[in-house]
Amino acid sequence: MPESTQTSVRDLPLDPITSPADPVTSPAPLTRDDLFPFVATGLIAGLTAELQPAANPSILSPAGEPAKVPSDSGRFETVQSSFATLAPPASSISWPTKMDVLGVEVSVTDYDELTRLFIAAGRRNESALATFLPVHGVVTAVLDQNYRYRINAFDVVAPDGQPVRWALNWLHKTELADRVSGPQMMLRLCARAAEQGVGIYLYGSTDETLNLLRANLEERFPDIRIVGMESPPFRALTNEENDQAVNRINASGAGLVFIGLGLPRQDFFAHKNRYRIKAVQLCVGAAFDFHAGKKKLAPVWMQKSGLEWTYRLLQEPRRLWKRYLITNTVFVYLMTRRLLRRA
């Protein structure tokens, strides 16, 4: 029988360590003939991906010029790229230290620290950018210097995937005990925001998903203030449309803006409006689908062992198998090469 899409967010654990394992059903296995060309592609990409310094703004697309970037769905879409012309506002927040992982600056942090900092910035309506990168996100940034430039300008780039946390520990001896998952961070922030009266804005996904998400969040956190939500068109926004979205968000008074557009589209939107939106922008990707009950989170043992990607692959094999095969292969290759160079 198909799974119900009416799963309440009340049923989702705030702390994944206490979550029971969910059963996993395996689809028909992919054949060797299917896999070989993509393994080869991933190895070639790893062998040829020599990291360059983060791109200088002068070589990137000028303001208003569309740039083609791979969307989370695996197809290419045009995303408007531009740089904020506003001067950086003064900030009262000291954001966590960031360290290099294959050219991507990843924050050395944890749930408790980020919850405190995001709520503090949200209460003051301070502009800030945060994203949560799994292996797929890191490899996308490695292979696309325009994307990497933007990501490295974020205040927080949290290690969403366990392999990203392991990389920080291996390369920099950070001794991080856990990753910082976007979906889990969203729940923690909603709980704290409800306690402290910080307004929340939901930007992304579909109207159906947003309605389910809102209902589930309000069921779990009765005092939560969802001050606005919208599903933007799945295409590049015109400058006028972008300005109108910024105005709606600012007029709502939200302190936290959760963005669920998929990687890298959500990060481009956040970076473009980094000093214009007077709130903390948090790029949480599939968190909208998880907390709306549209998709299931992986069992805890898979999350903690770095195998969450396999659970998502089993759920959506046709859409995700190319992505994970290529990006995971590239990540393993580049990390192995980096570690051998350090030996």
Image: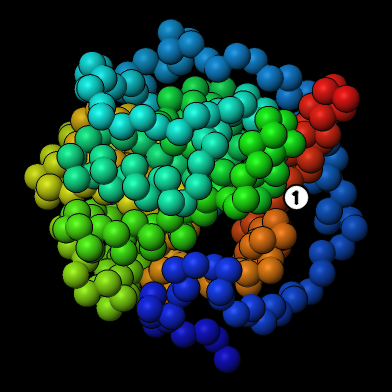
- Quadrant of the snapshot with the C terminus: top right
Residue nearest the viewer, comparing 130 with 247 = 130
Q: Which residue is mark 1?
A: 325
User: Residue at horizontal 31%, vertical 32%?
Assistant: 93
> The residue tagged with tag 1: helix, strand or loop?
helix
User: Residue at horizontal 12%, vertical 50%?
Assistant: 252
Residue 247 lies in what quarter of the image? top left
Residue 138 lies in what quarter of the image? top right
User: Residue at horizontal 34%, vertical 56%?
Assistant: 189
Q: Residue 37 location in percent, x, y?
A: 84, 45
Q: In the displayed image of the protein, which residue is found farthest to the left?
A: 251
Please determine whether, in this image, residue 244 is positioned above or below residue 271. Answer: below
Q: Is residue 105 left or right of residue 198?
A: right
Amino acid beneath label 1: Leu
Q: Residue 232 location in percent, x, y?
A: 29, 50
Residue nearest the viewer, comparing 33 with 138 = 138
Q: Is residue 244 left or right of residue 181?
A: left
